[in-house]
């Protein structure tokens, strides 16, 4: 009985160490900004209110607009479907906002499908690969980036991250830490779902 208890304690300790390592990885990726030329900028959707983007969504879109203005990609792919009760998709709201900021309508690709990050990334990957494109600059909140890179790599995309730094979530350290802790549980699920995370696409901690 004591031997079994010791093994259980070791397993719990090992699980805690692994979880802590993944939390660190999520935090580390959240600090990166890998902006560079890519085939497309991909923006993950967020909530809107009767067609008005939330502050979180605006922060993501503003970051995408900055990257586009720097000529890092010829198109911005906006994602996100409709939540229950919505009359317009997150992607459509994003497109209207970016055009209002001066982006050409032809430069904004609207993918109004997906109720979660995995579905949105799958939709973006399909659109890109149908056109022979493979490299993306991912834009979302910092806490979100590690999982998005894993999703992108799972769809054979080469992904770099350039998160917004103006999201209200980032101004609340406690909330952001909670999100990172939650992401640390989700990232391994994506890894195992896709069975691989390539080093060329996944930021790695130094050393």
Image: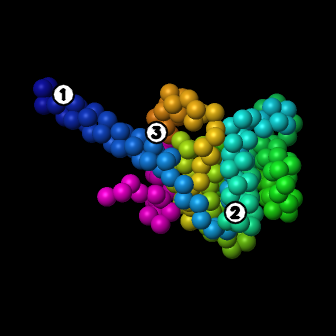
- How many marks can you see? 3
- Other-residue count near label 2 (Cα within 10 Å), few / some / many at <14 / 14–19 / ≥20: few
Q: Can you identify the residue that label 1 sits on?
A: 5
* Above-or-below relation of 198 to 117: below
Which stretch appears magenta?
185-207
Residue 46 visible within the image: no
Q: Are marks 1 and 2 in contact (CB under 8 Å)?
A: no
Give the residue at x 60% y 43%: 165
Give the residue at x 56% y 29%: 172
Task: List x then y, in percent, for residue 151.
Answer: 56, 54
The Cα atoms of the two marked residues, 1 and 2, are separated by 58 Å
- The circle drawn on residue 185 is 3
Give the residue at x 68% y 58%: 67
Quadrant in which residue 18 is drawn: top left
- Other-residue count near label 1 (Cα within 10 Å), few / some / many at <14 / 14–19 / ≥20: few
Q: Can you identify the residue that label 2 sits on?
A: 70
Which quadrant: the N terminus? top left
Q: Is residue 205 magenta?
A: yes
């Amino acid at each position: 009985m004591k031997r079994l208890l010791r093994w259980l304690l070791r397993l719990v300790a090992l699980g805690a160490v692994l979880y802590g390592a993944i939390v660190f990885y999520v935090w580390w990726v959240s600090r990166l900004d890998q902006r560079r030329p890519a085939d497309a900028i991909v923006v993950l959707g967020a909530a809107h209110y009767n067609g008005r983007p939330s502050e979180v969504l605006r922060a993501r879109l503003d970051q995408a607009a900055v990257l586009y203005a720097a000529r890092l990609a010829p198109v911005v792919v906006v994602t996100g479907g409709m939540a229950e009760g919505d009359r317009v998709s997150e992607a459509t709201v994003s497109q209207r906002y970016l055009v209002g900021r001066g982006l050409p309508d032809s430069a904004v690709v609207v993918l109004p499908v997906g109720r979660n990050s995995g579905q949105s990334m799958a939709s973006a990957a399909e659109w890109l690969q149908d056109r022979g494109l493979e490299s993306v600059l991912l834009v979302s909140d910092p806490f979100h980036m590690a999982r998005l890179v894993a999703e992108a790599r799972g769809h054979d995309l080469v992904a770099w991250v350039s998160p917004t730094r103006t999201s209200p979530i980032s101004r609340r350290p406690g909330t952001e830490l909670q999100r990172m802790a939650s992401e640390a549980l989700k990232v391994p699920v994506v890894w195992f779902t896709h069975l691989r995370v390539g080093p060329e696409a996944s930021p790695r901690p130094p050393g």
